[in-house]
Image (spheres, rainbow, N blue to C red):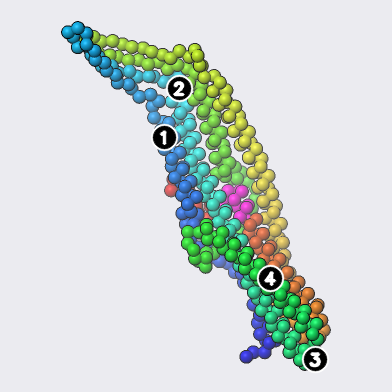
Amino acid sequence: MRPLVTRSKVLFAALSLVVSTGYAHAQEPAPQWQQSVLEHPSVKAAERQAEAMIAQGQQLTQPLYNPTLSSRLEREGEFNNYTIGLSQTFDWSTGNEARASQSDAMTVLAESLYEQAATDQAKTLLTAYVRWFDAKQRFALAEQQEQIVQQAIELVAERRKAGDLGAIDEQLTVLALSRQLQQSAAAYQRLQTAEADLRALLTSTELTAQAIDRELFNVKPKLNSSWQQHPTLTAAYLKWQLKRADINWQRSLTQANPTFGIEAGESGNENVVGLSFSVPLQIRNNYTDAVQAANNEAVAAEQRVLALRKEWEAALSSALNNYRFVKRQWQSWGENFQSRQTTSMQLIKQAWLTGDLSTTDYLTAMQQQLDSQFAGIELQTAYRLAAIEWLYRSGGLSEQLGLPPLSQ
């Protein structure tokens, strides 16, 4: 069995590597990410909904009126009279043109809504993964710290027998272990919650197969006009266009469309041919209120687009500033603390063993070291979440994950 001091040094090194190895090495991207997004039920539902909307749009391109076939048979004395007629209503009010405009907007809107659903799902999935990875690192760190405190209890017991330490030192280390057990339990609960959230979003339950290339988060953001093509903004704009097309449709209803018909048959053993014409009289209802309502809805939709664009632009600028700042903080932590973790902890340990540091100061210093490593994990998580938010707001998340459009 190795001496306790040697074993504790090994644990010190392992403890410092919880943060450094978990974050310093690039991870290979897994193909399951794209599959997990595209195969998730919410995205599949959005795909079907988009296909239904496209079908509805195609229906609007069809002629507005079908021909009408009519027939009549009657008995007049000794004669059987009959007629067969065909009538057709003609669209003289440009209703078909209005419906065609709606069809075009609905087709593009369907694609934008699908892309919006896929992008939102990708953001939710990556966020869940980052939070799970955060919880995983915190739990590993808590477990390592728990082992160090347990070994400190053993060291205190040996030194107390040798007369170097008193009963109060042993009691302090036991209290430290109690606190650490609570932290480990809390970290485990957090890990289980994060793992459940992540599993609900994955098509595969193998969490060990999931990894993200760190270059996904190492973006070089800059403000440009590409964010204006974000599917969320595009969908809002197309909804406005649909409302505008509905104005033309409602306006077409205020104009009467005539119906022409032709009839042929026999009456009293004589052949008869007739023409018919009818047109609705827009007297009791001229549908102008519907036009006004459609116009107000279009104006409201336009204002919603303007509000969303202002909100999005502000959020984009905030996401950019947040990403740059948090990235600098994370890099600063790595430069100033990450490489010094092992040496610092060993120096604190050695000072305690030689009597230059009291047990109280030793436990306080160890807690500060632990807090520093937790801070590293928190900064890493904040940096990754900021990168995801920027990619999402700027419209680059789908491109980064290679999410195909609906047409593919």
Say whether disc 2 or disc 1 marks the residue closer to the N-terminus: 1
Percent x, y for residue 383?
66, 59
At label 1, counting other C-alpha atoms closer than 10 Å, the crowd grade (few under 14, some 14-19, many 20 or more) is some
Numbered disc in front, either 3 or 2: 3
Numbered disc in front, either 2 or 4: 4
Residue labelled with disc 4: 182
Q: Secondary structure at mark 2?
A: loop
Q: Are marks 1 and 4 in contact (CB under 8 Å)?
A: no
Residue labelled with disc 3: 163
Numbered disc in front, either 3 or 1: 3
Percent x, y for residue 138?
65, 68
Residue labelled with disc 1: 58
Q: CA distance from mark 3 to mark 1?
A: 90 Å
Residue labelled with disc 2: 94
Percent x, y for residue 123?
57, 53
Say whether disc 1 or disc 4 marks the residue closer to the N-terminus: 1
Q: Which residues are magenta?
A: 387-397
Task: Kindly report the secondary structure that dominates the magenta region of the rendered protein.
Answer: helix
Q: Residue at x 75, y 79 (%)?
A: 173
Give amino acid for label 3. Answer: Gly
Give amino acid for label 4. Answer: Gln
Q: Secondary structure at mark 4?
A: helix
